[in-house]
Amino acid sequence: MSDRVMNKDRTDFRPRRVNRLAVLLKASMQRIWSSSLFLSLGVFLTTLTSCGNPPSNSNNTNFPYGIAVCSSSCNTYVQTGTTPTISTPFAAVTSYGTHQILIFTGYTNSTTNDWLISNNSLSPTTALYNSLQGPDGLLISSQSFTTSNGYVCPAPVLYGADGISNLIGIWCGFNPNNGSNPGPTITINSGSFQSPEGMALDWVNSSGKTLSAPILFVANPGSSDILAFDLSQVTGAGTLSLSPSGGLLPGTHGGLPFGQPANNTGLNGPAFVAFSNSKNTLFVSDTGNSQVNLYGNGYCIGVNQESTRPSNCSSSQNISPSVWFSGTNTYLSTPSGIAYYQGGLYVVDPGAASVLIWDNVMNTVTPGGNIAPTRRINGSNTNENYPYALVVDGNTNTPPGNTFFVSQLGSGRILGYNNATTISGNIAPTYMIGVTNPSLSSGNTSGGGTTGYPGFP
């Protein structure tokens, strides 16, 4: 029961267990509702409200578990000499409590762009809610993919995880100006999903050759493992029952049957993943163990269950992390959002109310490193209010560029920080974006409630 109690940090009175409680909240929605689960949920919502006063009506974004941006280059592996372009830059934010993905166009910086005006309240251009019950993790790619049978999913591609329905939705050729609420082009249905959340794409094999379709890594906190799906196996549009092509087993505390030996992976409720194509490395925020894991030879992890995997790739899913960060020096409490950018590892930690950054992270070769972050964004000036999801816009050709955004579970806001590679300390955000959606005043008829808290199907 200790994970369900909101412990306080004595210095800043912020919760130390927000992320694990968020996992509990989402996972419990998929089960039969007993009185004890209703009680636990009520305690969670009441405590979070008293600690951080999250939005209490459906006119505001509610529990923004995911955020993604797309300027002219986003979340993609780009070969030398090629630059994919997006006709309409946009940002996306999940509103978990109202069962929506909110879309904002006109993302690039200009004197008329509402998205980047500090302390602005902004309504989305459009919202997706078709068939969504618990949207959480988000990913946007400006890279199209072609499957083994020739099916083409054109760019830009929006990926959304649904933690209640246990599905991954893929919107191919997504048009952010389309107000008709389109459903996903492709829906991945797998019996292995248990509250899927963070996602990442691997666009290269272990030899560095570009893949025609990526490996989609999915953090699966409900069963404490990592799943991978080879998208070359997609047969076309529609709902597909796709088996994982690879992944990692749960670790010591990952829901293993009593008495079963612990696995080597060290995973316990992982919430988010990131992938470096240049380093062939998988990064995992291992939330329940208060640590961050790095797994080398990431492509092989993505295909370790495929019969056609390369001969140099093992079939084992019981793999120890190559490097991990854990201990008091790291400031890690409940790591969630994670990104790898220009050699640095960026980690959001709601329990520590911080963004923690390890620069030149791949130069760290000592396993089990109780290593302090190079930079830490923390303190009253930051306006961090249960920070959760993180995305970096690394496109320096389109302003603002070199900027990262962090969603706030407590306030429902999105905070943005310029100068991602150098920013540090108790510093105010460059942007504070308050998200509103007046169209929800009468309730989301597709599943969301009007109370501001997650509705139940």
Image: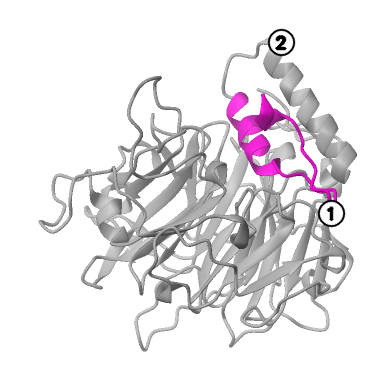
Height in image: 386 above or below 298?
above
The reply to whether discs 1 and 2 touch (Cβ–Cβ < 8 Å) is: no
Q: Which colour scheme is used?
A: one colour
- The answer to if 282 sits in the magenta stretch is no
- The answer to if 21 sits in the magenta stretch is yes
Categorize mark 2 by other alpha carbons within 10 Å: few (<14), some (14-19), many (20+).
few
Q: Dot 2: what SS?
A: helix
* Quadrant in the rendering for residue 349: bottom right
Q: Is residue 334 left or right of residue 387?
A: left
Comparing marks 1 and 2, which lies closer to the viewer? 1
Quarter of the image with the N terminus is top right
Q: Dot 1: what SS?
A: loop
Categorize mark 1 by other alpha carbons within 10 Å: few (<14), some (14-19), many (20+).
few
| Residue that numbered label 2 is attached to | 35
Q: In this view, does 207 lie to the left or right of 358?
A: left
The residue sitting at 68% across, 38% down in the picture is 99
Could you say where residue 343 lies in the image, as x and y percent from the top left? 48, 77
| Residue that numbered label 1 is attached to | 11
Q: What stretch is highlighted in magenta?
A: 1-28
The residue sitting at 79% across, 73% down in the picture is 116
Which of disc 2 and disc 1 is earlier in sequence? 1
Marks 1 and 2, how far apart at CA: 35 Å
Q: In this view, does 287 lie to the left or right of 154?
A: right
Could you say where residue 203 lies in the image, as x and y percent from the top left? 34, 66
- The type of residue carrying mark 1 is Thr
Quarter of the image with the C terminus is top right
